[in-house]
Structures are given as C-alpha cells and as structure tokens.
Image (tube, rainbow, N blue to C red):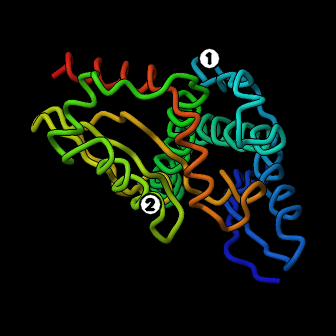
Amino acid sequence: MEKIRKAWISDEGKNQFFIHDVYIFGGTMKKIFLVFLIFISASVVAVEKQPGEYEPKDFSHLIGMQGFSDSLLKMHFTLYHGYVKNTNLLIRLIEESQGYTFGALQRRFGWEFDGMRLHEFYFENLGGKKPFDHSSALNKMLDRDFGSFKKWKEDFIATGLMRGIGWAILYFDPKADRLFNVWINEHDLGHLAGGDLILVMDVWEHAYITEYGLDRAKYIENFFKNIDWDAVSSRFHNAVIRR
C-alpha cells in the first residue's frame, strides 16, 4: 500500500473537510480509488447554508455518454460537488479567521475554487454529437496559430499526456489575439492571466482511472469523441467579441 498525501482543514473541531488522500492497493486500486473519491465529497460536514453560496450545477444529461460509464460520471459529479462545498466553507472560514490561519486558508482558496470552476468548464464542453466545423472562425485561428487543426489536436493531446496531475486547456489570449495549449498543474498553477478558457480537459486520475486504468491516451481519445464543439465555439466567439 502506498500513501501519497493526506491533508485536513478544521475549524476548531466544528467543521472539517478532506483535501487529498490517495491509497493504492495493488489489484484493487480501482475500487479503493472510487471509494476514496466518494469520501472526499462526503467528508464535508454539513453547515448552515449562507446567502450567496455557490450551488453545484446539474450535469446528469451526460449520463450515457460514449466511453464514460455511468459510475465514472456519477463519481466525478460527486467529487465536483465536494469542491463546491469546500469553496463555500473556505469563504466562511476566511471571514472568521485571522493571522496565520487566515493566510493558510486564503492560500488554499484558489485551489478549491479552481477545482470547482474547472470541473464546470470540463463538463460543459462534453456531451456533443456534432463533428468539429472546419469552416468555423475557431478553425481559422487554429490553422493560423498551430498550422492546422490536426497539428493543434496533436499538440493538445501531447499536453494532456504530460506526466503529473492537472488539466490541459486551450486558452485564448485577447491581448495578443492568439491561442495557446496550456498545462495547468493541479488546479491553480499555470493559468494565463487575462486569458479565456476555450476547451478544458481534466487529466487528473479521477477523470479516467476507474474506466481506463493508466491508459490516459485512450481516455483522451474518447474525450475528443464527446466534445461539445458548439459550446467550445460559443466560448471562442464570446472571447473574441470581448477583446
């Protein structure tokens, strides 16, 4: 058994939530991993709902998506709900804290918030049925910045296959009017300031390991089969007109 990391945050024993704790048990890794991910969300102790709190979005329409079992998606939704709960909890704890505790919680906030928001971007750009429109404005910019759609896709996949846990994101820089494929370490390291997120792919193990084991390439292949290109093109259009 290998223990990778464990961390808790507590509020004088009243509230407690689990950050990250991974155990690998040989051949039973998938089952243990699934239990661990469900535990992350369930570990948030219920607190009284406050005005203005974030609410988890409903992505149940993705159930039945090709290449993603119902159990994988439901587990992933549960994990996403945990980020929403932890974001709300941190907001409250930060307001009530001071000194060293304030600094520690403030530093943690971006990690939980980005974990929440990136999952929303991810789920929102899935569930598509239409192929990519090679006559679109997005394709024209991909051709200009990467040479072709094919070369962009190869670069994006290569980014997603990098060692580590995180995200592969197609970013639009409105200042320079160009596109970049970017690796985000964990949730909060590597974002392009002022950039717009166009396509978001989760490459944390929880996104695929119960379905594909360590075969991240196969997961990425099926991710591309399910991209909602209308949602992606809409993000790009909105980013361009906001320049």
**Where residue 96 sits: x, y (%)?**
57, 40
Q: Amino acid at mark 2?
A: Asn
**Where residue 197 sits: x, y (%)?**
36, 35
Residue found at x 60% / y 25%: 54
Separation of residues labelled 1 and 2 (CA atoms): 32 Å
| Residue that carries the numbered disc 1 in the rendered image | 51
Instruction: Specify the quadrant of the image occupied by residue 115.
Output: top right
| Residue that carries the numbered disc 2 in the rendered image | 185
* Location of residue 57 with respect to 106 vertically, above or below: above
Q: Amino acid at mark 1?
A: Pro
Q: Label 1 neighbourhood size at 10 Å, few (<14), some (14-19), many (20+)?
A: few
Left or right, residue 160 beside residue 213: left
* Location of residue 67 with respect to 167 vertically, above or below: above
* Location of residue 190 with respect to 122 vertically, above or below: below
Residue found at x 69% / y 22%: 58
Depth order, front residue of 53/118 = 118
Left or right, residue 195 beside residue 70: left
Residue found at x 24% / y 43%: 148
The answer to which of marks 1 and 2 sits earlier in the sequence is 1
Q: Label 2 neighbourhood size at 10 Å, few (<14), some (14-19), many (20+)?
A: some
